[in-house]
Amino acid sequence: MPANRPASEEPRLSVTRPTRVRPRRSVLAFALPVPIVGLILLLATGNLLLPLRQVVTIEAKMASKRDFFQDPEVERLLMKHGFRVHITSMGSREIANQDFEGYDVVFPSGQPAADLISRERAEANRPVLLYRPFVSPIVLATYRNYAEALVGADVAEAQPNPDGRPMYYTLDMTPFVNLTEEGKRWSDIDIEGHGVRNSNKILAQTSDICESNSAGTYLGLVAFVQNDNDAPNDEKEAARVAQKIKPLLVEQGLPSSERAETYLSPDGQSIAPISVIYEHQFLAHQIRHQAEKGATDDARVLLYPSTRFVTEPQLVALTGDGARLGELVSEDPELQHRAMELGFRARNNNSGGTTGDELTEFLTARHIPVPTTSSDDTRAVLPPLPLLEQMIKSVGDCPDRKGDLP
């Protein structure tokens, strides 16, 4: 366990200016020792004359947004500012329900887990600082033949792509959930006509509901749809809706800890035709694919739920060093630009924290289709935090742990 630093502690930066070493005027006729050669090289490049910066190691617990901090370019940019981030990986809800003493930051993937942490710290009179450097919508990742089968069943509609076949589809959540509720199978909607033989039930697979923010958010989305586009607002209603949707979410088999990894694997289509992931994970894949192969991955596509919910990942700073990191990733132009290159919708701090058009321009310049979201789409609302926790525990049969709400 890393050593805990008090929240008020500021990083100790020491600046050392080395003494300028003047080279001898005489020409040496013999081989120089290796240390002297290295010294001459440092002088020639000017690196020896730069001030030395102490690197602060940030201890962090993170869920899917570790993708950003594990990127080599992000690591380089953070190092330039004197930070190294050591990450302990786990699911968002697992982060909130474990001890985070000795850590500088925790970064769950959505607001519910961050709220759990904030509530507990407030009760202990140890408030936290929250930072929202970027957003990433919940999406349903699938493959073209499955998306086209849903179009044929009047459950999905392709978004226009003037340059070729569609990469994005709008999924009508009510009939889609109804297909799962009615026990319909892919063979019932003519998946064979799209070159696939699959008689499994039609459903979206999630990560572990007890651990993952994406799974908990999808649970809230299904609950919203099944409750006539309204979030449950009392314990009795939450219990009723949880029992109604439980069969729709527990028939998916053994969920993996990270659906995006399965979806992007060569065998992903045979394991899970539809996976609940974050938009940035899909876009980052397409950006890499375009850069490496000169074309997008035509087999993989996204379903955008018509009833949508935009996640609000919050970096929770627990110490002074953590707060400095939160400010840096939220405000530094280079880090914000890199977030966009990794598929995130970076927040524009000059526009009141709203996401701008930078991602659209970036994708267009690289000939990657840009997703559109209709202004008429219904925006889902999650239940209040205590009710959402109650529903997650009921649907997932989750054990009681530290931080659970009554």
Image: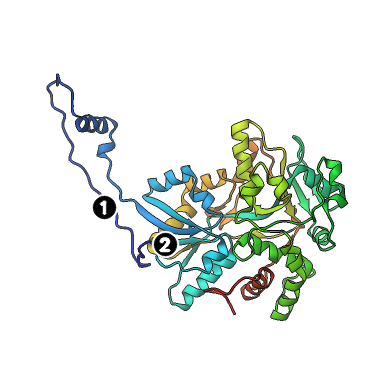
Horizontal and vertical percent for residue 300? 71, 42
Residue 104: quadrant of the picture: bottom left
* Gap in angstroms between the C-alphas marked 1 and 2: 20 Å
Picture layout, residue 363 above or below residue 380: above
Say what amino acid the circle numbered 2 marks: Asp
User: Which residue is under mark 2?
Assistant: 104
Locate residue 205 relative to residue 336 in the image: left or right. Answer: right
Q: Dot 1, how many residues are within 10 Å of its Cα: few (below 14), some (14-19), or many (20+)?
A: few
Residue 294, quarter of the rendered image = top right
Q: Is residue 224 visible?
A: no
In the image, taking residue 57 as reference, residue 184 lies left or right, namely right
x%, y% of residue 362? 60, 40
**Residue underneath mark 1:** 14
Q: Nearer the viewer, residue 12 or 148?
A: 148
Identify the image quadrant of residue 225. Answer: bottom right
Looking at the rendered image, the disc whose residue lies closer to the viewer, 1 or 2, is: 2
Q: SS of the residue at dot 1?
A: loop
Q: Residue at x 57, y 59 (%)?
A: 109
